[in-house]
Image: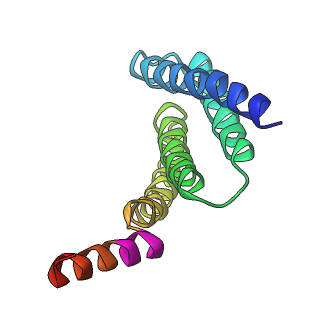
Amino acid sequence: MKRAARFSRRVVDPVNSVAWYAMDGLWLAHLTWPAYLATGLTLATGATLLLLDRRPGQRLNDDLALNAWMWMNALWVVSDLGRQPPLRYAAMAVGCVGAILLANAVRPSRTYRERLRRFRKMRTIGR
């Protein structure tokens, strides 16, 4: 099962990156429906990345922050191309949630801080 999940992630992650790049490029070119299709693919592959890493841990935190960024970007695309300015406020709210998730993902874990504290203690004792 682990091997299959690893393979799936190796496939889904690049597809997600390509879809996201296409979404932004099509948005820039003002190609509305192709941009919407790329947006749907981006969000679907982002959700798949979350499903592939269901167990808690650093990668899940990273994927949650990345998905918040995707949703912010997707709402912004729809707001801009669909001429629906209120969605921009929803994009800002999702962006704030993403910033909180990103700060949580970057924050060192408790076990890391404890290991660092022990190392500092050993260094001061002279071991």
- Residue at the spot x=47%, y=73% of the render? 111
Q: Main secondary structure of the magenta part?
A: helix
In this figure, which colouring scheme has been used for the structure?
A: rainbow
Task: Pick whichever, 72 or 51, lies toward us.
Answer: 51
**Magenta span:** 109-115
Q: Position of residue 31 (x, y in %)?
A: 51, 16
For this view, does 112 lie left or right of residue 62? Answer: left
Image quarter hosting the C terminus: bottom left
- Residue 53 vertical placement versus 45 (above, below): below
Instruction: Identify the residue shown where x is 51% and y is 27%.
Output: 20
Which quadrant holds the N terminus? Answer: top right
Of all residues, the one furthest to the right in this rendering is: 1
Left or right of 116 in this view: 73: right
Q: Can you say whether 68 is above or below 125 in the image?
A: above
Task: Tell whether 120 sits left or right of 21.
Answer: left
Q: Could you say where residue 92 lies in the image, as x and y percent from the top left?
A: 43, 57
Instruction: Place residue 28 in its image quadrant.
Output: top left
- Does 66 appear above or below 18? below
Q: Which of 57/89 is in front?
A: 57
Task: Check residue 6 for magenta coloring.
Answer: no
User: In this figure, what is the number of numbered marks?
Assistant: 0
Residue 1, placed above or below residue 106: above
Q: Residue at x 42, y 58 (%)?
A: 102
Q: Residue 114 in magenta? A: yes
Residue at position x 46%, y 51% in the image: 88
Residue 21's x, y, as percent?
46, 22
